[in-house]
Amino acid sequence: MVYSRTGTEPGRCLSFSGPGKFRLSMSMLTMVSTLAFFPGAGKASLEQIPSILKNNDVQPLSPAIDAPDFSLEDLSGRKAPLSGHHGRWVLLTFWAPWCGPCLSELPSLEKLHETMEKKGLDIVGVALSDSTDAVRKVVNVDSIGFTVLVDKGGKAASMYNAFSVPTSFIIDPAGRIVGITRGARDWSSQEDMFKDLLAALPPSAQAAKRYLAGADKTIELPKGIEPPTAEARLDSAEVYLGQTFNLLVEVKWTGEIKDYILHPPSLKPPEGIRLLNVHASSSSSGGKQVIIYQVALKAEKTGEFDLDPVQLSYTPLLDGKRVTTRIKGPAVKVEERTFLGMDILQLSAVMGAILLLAIGGLLVTKNRRKRKRQDGGAKVELDPVEVLDRNLKQARKHLLDGNALGLLESVKEMNSLGFGEDAMHDQDLDGLLEQVKYGGKKPSKEELERWLRGFETRLSEMKRKRDEEY
């Protein structure tokens, strides 16, 4: 048999001559090769996968990326490779026991598992944690039945660039990543999407195996999908008792500054370290956008303290879902500085500064009293008492309206202004906020009122001190 090529446009034909003469187009050859790669799937069906994902707010990867294989221990201590799910669709989700959005989406993942497992979809949850017991506790509370693996060293998360959680990857039966999504979602509402994917590319044990064995490098994600990275450091090598110092959190990402909404970093200072305030500045470096958060802290006790972990949240505008990550914070050693450790010039400078501050304070107090007498008590600047009073009134209005989310956000705002005891870093508040926002939790009126009592006490104290001052 001989053949000759005719036509120069895409879809040109190959003419065969000989017994059983026929003509076969290039598009038909493509379909034949596709069917050989994925038995039971047509080319038109495969081409529908990106649109199926996009229509369900999942970022499609085109071309698809071969998924790095890894092997982690499950909760019973047995090693389980990702490639063990070859031939089936896989929803690979990275989560953590400390992540509020992650915990809120686990029940919906379990519902999806119950309805789709027998149809060809496996769910694999990779928990970023150094404690198997902490992961087991969450799994038992939520009665999770899908596969849960523990990534104690963060190796798998590093392969998939998934230190921001929750992050999920959709992998086809051959072992190729076809889609990625960040942030919590109701996965039980995605059943139709997975049915469409299964119809476009049915599970098959004969599918070519594309899992990358022995991979030790981070996968390269397309521009716009690569998440922000961050590191934390101190601005001073020496910290003394009573000194104010700064924790600098530097956040970098590719793309435009408008691609993400960054939220202030969250740190629960150890006892002996007090949070004062947070400021931010932005710039660009090496083709990346940079925001540096300056977290002002005060050392109130001597000793060694771990400022760890630092929790960072951001919202990609691509899908509008909040994502949380934790970064390693530095350790700080606070020492006591005595007069014997200061030379005469340093001591003179300190005493002079104290004297100037005292004189300045007297002058400011005198001027305030004089101005109050002159203008009948009108204030020329916004008083902290008024700020807290205004925010409390707004929170009370949310309480009367039954708006739990609005009330909790008002509480977080008052914390961020420095009126709370653990300024804006109360993990219980963050957890409750995520449960209300993503998990549909409805706190009782009594529970909400408890969040306001501390601020009301603080307001009374501030009013009393202001009255004494005047």
Image (tube, rainbow, N blue to C red):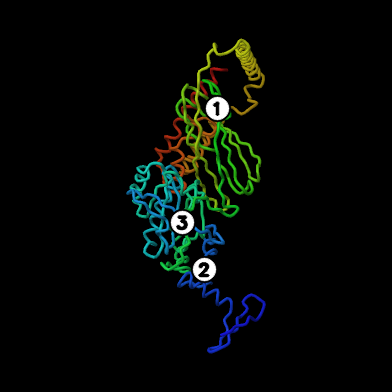
Question: How many residues crowd mark 1 within 10 Å: few (<14), some (14–19), many (20+)?
Answer: some
When the figure is inspected, residue 322 is found, relative to residue 299, above or below; the finding is below
- Give the residue pinned by disc 1: 385
Q: Marks 1 and 2: which is nearer the front?
A: 2
Question: Which amino acid type corresponds to the residue marked 1 in the rendered image?
Answer: Val
The amino acid on which the numbered mark 3 sits, given as a three-letter code, is Ala
> Measured from the top left, where is residue 302 in percent x and y?
47, 21
Tell me if label 1 and label 2 are in contact, CB under 8 Å. no
Query: Who's the residue at 45% across and 52% down the image?
Result: 93
Residue 8, x across and y down, in percent: 67, 77
Identified at 42% across, 56% down, the residue is 82
Mark earlier in primary sequence (2, 3): 2
| Residue located beneath label 2 in the image | 46
Give the number of the disc on residue 213: 3
- Tell how many labels: 3
Q: 133 left or right of 297?
A: left
The mark nearer the N terminus, 1 or 3, is 3
Q: Residue furthest front?
A: 1
Check disc 2: other Cα within 10 Å, few if <14, some if 14-19, many if 20+: some
Q: Residues within 10 Å of mark 3 (few under 14, many from 20)?
A: few
Q: Nearer the viewer, mark 2 or mark 3?
A: 3
Image: 177 above or below 136: below
Q: Which mark is residue 10?
A: none
Please provide percent x and percent y for residue 53: 52, 61
N-terminal of the pair, mark 1 or mark 2, is 2
Residue type at numbered disc 2: Leu
Badge 1 vs badge 3, beta-carbon distance below 8 Å: no
Of the 4 image quadrants, the one containing the N terminus is bottom right
Is 163 or 399 nearer to us in this picture?
Answer: 163
Mark 2: secondary structure: helix
Separation of disc 2 and disc 3 at Cα? 25 Å
Of marks 1 and 3, the one in the foreground? 3
